[in-house]
Amino acid sequence: MEGRGTVVYVDEAGLNRTSFRDRAKANKMSMKEDNMFDISFKSGDMVYSGWVNPSQKLNDSGTPVSFHVVLNDTSFGYLSYRDCKWMINEDRPDKLVELVGEQIEKHYQL
């Protein structure tokens, strides 16, 4: 699915490829597209932007139990909220995990 704003490059085998973000956006169509949402924030001198894909599994209060996060075209990991703290399945800076968690909280107005 190539369209306006899609980044295409040719790999070593001569095949057309799209960026991780563009592939993920194209795959949105197979997911519940309205569940995914964009995030953007600044930490220090760095600006982060990306998207969040909430799991379809919900907790007792109706909030997704985990969130796949992509920042600056890189998979950041899967976040979940446990024991009053944002947790992630990757080795990421605690401050950055909290900032991403805050973006999720804003989206869900928690």
Image: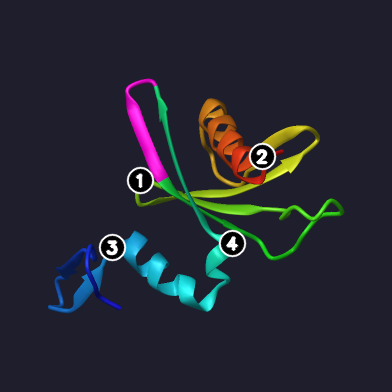
Q: Earlier in the sequence, mark 4 or mark 1?
A: 4
Disc 3 marks which amino acid?
Answer: Ser
Badge 3 marks a residue whose secondary structure is loop
Please identify the dominant SS of the magenta region. strand
Tag 3 and tag 2, C-beta contact below 8 Å:
no
Q: Residue at x 51, y 78 (%)?
A: 30
Q: Does the magenta stretch include residue 48?
A: yes
Q: Which residue is drawn at 33% across and 65% down?
A: 22
**Disc assigned to residue 35:** 4
Q: Earlier in the sequence, mark 4 or mark 2?
A: 4
Q: Specify start and end residues of the magenta stretch as a single range.
A: 44-49
Badge 2 marks a residue whose secondary structure is strand
Q: Earlier in the sequence, mark 4 or mark 3?
A: 3
**Disc assigned to residue 72:** 1
Q: Which residue is drawn at 51% across and 36% down?
A: 92
Quarter of the image containing the N terminus?
bottom left
Task: Give me the C-alpha separation between circle 4 and circle 1.
Answer: 20 Å
Could you classify mark 1 by the number of other residues whose Cα lies within 10 Å: few (under 14), some (14-19), or many (20 or more)?
A: some
Tag 4 and tag 2, C-beta contact below 8 Å:
no
According to the picture, the residue beneath numbered tag 2 turns out to be 87
Badge 4 marks a residue whose secondary structure is helix
